[in-house]
Amino acid sequence: MPKDDADAPSADGLATRCERACVDLIEERWRRAPGLAIRMAPGEPAVVERPGRTRFDLSWVAADLSFSGVLRGRLPLLPLADGSLALVVLDRLAMVDVGQLKPFLAEVFRVLADDGGLMVIDTNPWSWLGLRARWRGAPRTLAANQMGSLLRASGLEGIEIRHALCWPPLPSGFIERHSDLLDRTFSRIVPAAGSIYSVCGRKSSSNVIAIPFARDRRHGLLAAPEGMRRAG
């Protein structure tokens, strides 16, 4: 249909800008997480490497909550050892069932190493992009504050929320032509109206150091290891 042909370039252009914004958010976070990482997202599986960092991109299928690629499985279980990952990225999975999300977040917490991070990226349900998706029949995604509360309840700390693509409710064609200018302008005015949000949390380090003490029979006291002195 002629209408579809006219709308197609705009839709493709906006989708490309959304993808670019998500990639930028991930790259910024990933630079601070040396080690192994996984990213779940709709699309093809891949392996992405940087100096000192490797990320396995897994293909997400929302219909049956499964993922494939280097790792295969179905939520909520992750076939990984405890504390094996520096970063987990959940990229636009659009999980709206809190009952399914809670055990999955607990599993992510298990596989994160100390100081490892979880990053959740999704569409802001109250933004221009989120409202358009709902008008087209998509389910309402969780808001950033809701997602932050779930991450905090799973045991993660230092919750950070960011928004990107702050587009006003204007025609798609106009947004496509001026998307960068609109984003720069409205991100200073109403940053929480960003079409894409990221919520990040960190698994705190236990900071527990086991120090072997020996019994000092002369004084009936616990003697500190060599190199440490008793006060007085």
Image: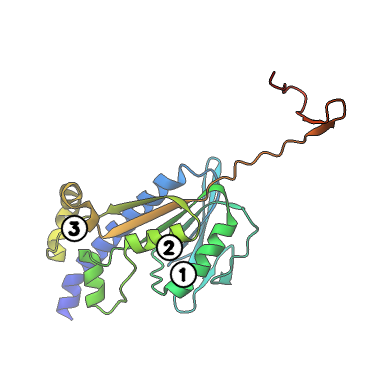
Residue positioned 59% across, 62% down in the render: 70
Residue type at the position of mark 1: Leu
Residue toward you, 216 or 181:
216
Residue type at the position of mark 2: Leu
How many tags in the picture?
3
**Label annotation for residue 167:** 3
Which percent across, then down, holds residue 189? 15, 49
Q: Which residue is mark 1?
A: 101
Q: Earlier in the sequence, mark 2 or mark 1?
A: 1
Relative height, residue 61 to residue 159 (above, below): below
C-beta proximity under 8 Å, tags 2 and 1: yes
Q: Residues within 10 Å of mark 3 (few under 14, many from 20)?
A: many
Q: Which residue is mark 2?
A: 150
Residue type at the position of mark 3: Trp
Instruction: Between label 3 and label 1, give the one nearer the viewer.
Output: 1
Question: In the visual, does 213 lie left or right of 36?
Answer: right
Residue positioned 58% across, 69% down in the render: 77
Instruction: Between label 2 and label 1, give the one nearer the viewer.
Output: 2
Relative height, residue 223 to residue 119 (above, below): above
